[in-house]
Image (tube, rainbow, N blue to C red):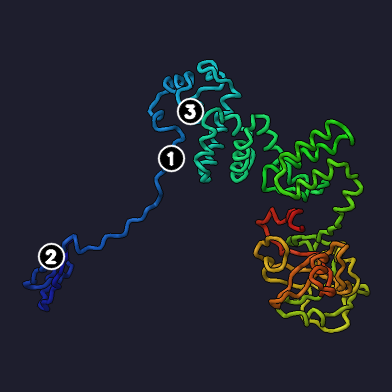
């Protein structure tokens, strides 16, 4: 790099001449410019930092074993036709041929593998890969090295954790394809049978109990006594794992009546409505309810001091309360809230995880309670707001409070309200959470 230095002209002697009517002023004996140049080494220059504007594409690792990766289409077809290697090794070749333009009928004609077999091999290999990646025992994986595609194909709809448990159960009990299909169906179907008689007696995390419950449920579709019903119950008893499940099947097998079984199980559970407020919902509601608000961190005293009676009247629906209060909330006229004629109050919590009896969403909530119903009742299945040992508050079922000797609460829970959000499509809780 060059550095230039210029010396300016300093002479003050000028002469004037007149040429063709124009005056011309020019310096006498002007001093020439002097220019100094110096070369700055490149090493001393500070180059701008290079920025990585994009990341080069890195394709995912190929599922094809290394020994088959160099094969062309003809070589892949030959491997499939001769079944060279283990099934999960040559199964990825089928997908590779699909990408090269081969169709299932063409592959069937060249290799003898039908379209159903091709799909079974591809899916079975994917299920096997998921079990391998989950860190399952090598001996479990090795059990499916020969003829395992059909068995693994049947458990494709299960989660990875369920696949591992189902695979272990299939190996331990020597299931065939039909047995694996029934097991997968039992595991997948169990959560949807909530509320059926005996559902709570079986453990969802154990494949044997899921299969036992399916057989137990099917037995109830047949008249008692009948040979088919007895056979199903005997099979259910044979595969049941937990003692609770075995007792439930035994009771059914020995002829306990339906009425007696229901009477033993009946525990009425009232599920509290959990709603998420929508943007603009209050403005568009045909009726609204105004409730005093208390912050949970203010403690029990503020809840007890909140106005008990307040009502709207007149042509403009002016709300009048028995005492002054600093915080109020307007909610749509939902039926559970309207039903609270006196003593209603909304308690706000900053974090639902410390309040609700299920896994929260780490967000603020508002719990509407009826202070007129403070007495804890065990048989009604309602939830109540109580003060816990740490000084906070939480929701507890009446039967649980009764077992602890708690007779009074701050009030019965009427409604749980979540704040409005645009990005929450799965805010509803599962039925299991209320138990």
The quarter of the rendered structure image containing the N terminus is bottom left
Q: Position of residue 368 (x, y in %)?
A: 80, 69
Q: On the picture, is 98 further left or further right than 387? A: left
Tell me where residue 169 appears, x and y as whole percent: 63, 39
Task: In this rendered view, identify the residue nearer to me: 258 or 162.
Answer: 258
Viewer-side residue, 378 vs 237: 237
Q: 73 or 424: nearer the eye? A: 73
Residue of label 2: 38
Dot 2 lies on which element?
Answer: strand
Percent position of residue 133, x then y: 51, 43
Query: From where the camera sits, is residue 161 visible?
Result: yes
Work out how far the residue at label 3 is from the one at label 2, CA to CA, in angstroms: 74 Å
Q: How far apart are marks 1 and 3 (CA)?
A: 25 Å
Residue at 89% from the left image edge and 78% from the top image edge:
309
Task: Give the residue displayed 56% in from the left and 30% down from the top.
Answer: 148
Q: Distance between the residues labelled 1 and 2?
A: 51 Å
Q: In this view, does 115 lie above or below 48?
A: above
Q: What residue is disc 3 on?
A: 86
Query: What residue is rendered at 62% in x and 33% in y?
Result: 174
Most extreme residue toward the left is: 29
Residue at which label 1 appears: 59
- The residue that appears at 45% across and 26% down in the rendered structure is 85
Q: For residue 213, what is the image quadrant?
A: top right
Instruction: Give the foreground label among 3 and 2.
Output: 3
Q: Do the residues labelled 1 and 3 touch (CB within 8 Å)?
A: no
For marks 1 and 3, give the one nearer the viewer: 3
Q: Going from the N terminus, do you reach mark 1 or mark 2 first?
A: 2
- With respect to residue 150, does 77 lie above or below? above
Q: How crowded is mark 2: few (under 14 residues within 10 Å), some or many (20 or more)?
A: few
Which secondary structure lies at badge 1? loop
- The image quarter in which residue 325 lies: bottom right
């Amino acid at each position: 790099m060059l550095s230039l230095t210029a010396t300016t002209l300093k002479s003050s002697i000028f002469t004037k001449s007149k040429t063709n009517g124009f005056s011309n002023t020019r310096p006498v004996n002007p001093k020439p410019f002097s220019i100094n140049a110096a070369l700055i080494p490149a090493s001393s220059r500070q180059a701008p930092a290079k920025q990585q504007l994009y990341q080069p594409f890195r394709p995912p690792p190929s599922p094809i074993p290394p020994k088959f990766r160099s094969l062309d289409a003809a070589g892949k077809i030959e491997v499939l036709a001769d079944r060279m290697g283990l099934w999960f090794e040559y199964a990825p070749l089928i997908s590779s041929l699909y990408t090269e333009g081969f169709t299932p009928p063409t592959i069937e004609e060249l290799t003898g593998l039908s379209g159903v077999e091709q799909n079974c091999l591809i899916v079975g290999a994917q299920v096997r890969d998921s079990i391998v990646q989950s860190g399952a025992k090598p001996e479990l994986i090795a059990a499916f090295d020969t003829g395992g595609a059909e068995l693994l194909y049947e458990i494709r709809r299960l989660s990875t954790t369920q696949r591992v448990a189902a695979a272990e159960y299939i190996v331990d009990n020597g299931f065939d394809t039909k047995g694996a299909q029934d097991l997968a169906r039992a595991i997948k179907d169990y959560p949807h049978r909530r509320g059926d008689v005996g559902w709570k007696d079986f453990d969802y995390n154990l494949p044997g109990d899921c299969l036992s419950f399916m057989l137990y449920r099917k037995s109830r579709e047949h008249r008692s006594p009948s040979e088919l019903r007895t056979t199903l119950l005997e099979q259910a008893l044979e595969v049941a794992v937990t003692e609770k499940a075995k007792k439930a099947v035994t009771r059914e097998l020995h002829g306990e009546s339906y009425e007696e079984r229901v009477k033993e199980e009946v525990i009425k559970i009232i599920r509290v409505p959990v709603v998420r407020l929508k943007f603009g919902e209050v403005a568009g509601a045909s009726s609204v309810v105004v409730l005093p608000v208390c912050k949970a961190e203010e403690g029990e005293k503020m809840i007890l001091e909140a106005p008990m009676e307040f009502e709207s009247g007149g042509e403009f629906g002016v709300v009048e309360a028995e005492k002054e209060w600093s915080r109020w909330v307007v909610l749509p006229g939902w039926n559970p809230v309207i039903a609270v004629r006196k003593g209603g109050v909304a308690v706000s919590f900053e974090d639902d995880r410390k309040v609700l009896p299920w896994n929260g969403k780490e967000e603020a909530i508002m719990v509407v309670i009826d202070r007129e119903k403070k007495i804890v009742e065990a048989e009604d299945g309602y939830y109540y707001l109580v003060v816990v040992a740490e000084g906070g508050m939480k929701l507890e079922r009446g039967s649980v409070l009764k077992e602890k000797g708690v007779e009074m609460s701050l009030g019965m829970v009427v409604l749980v309200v979540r704040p409005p959000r645009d990005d929450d499509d799965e805010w509803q809780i599962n039925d299991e959470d209320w138990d």
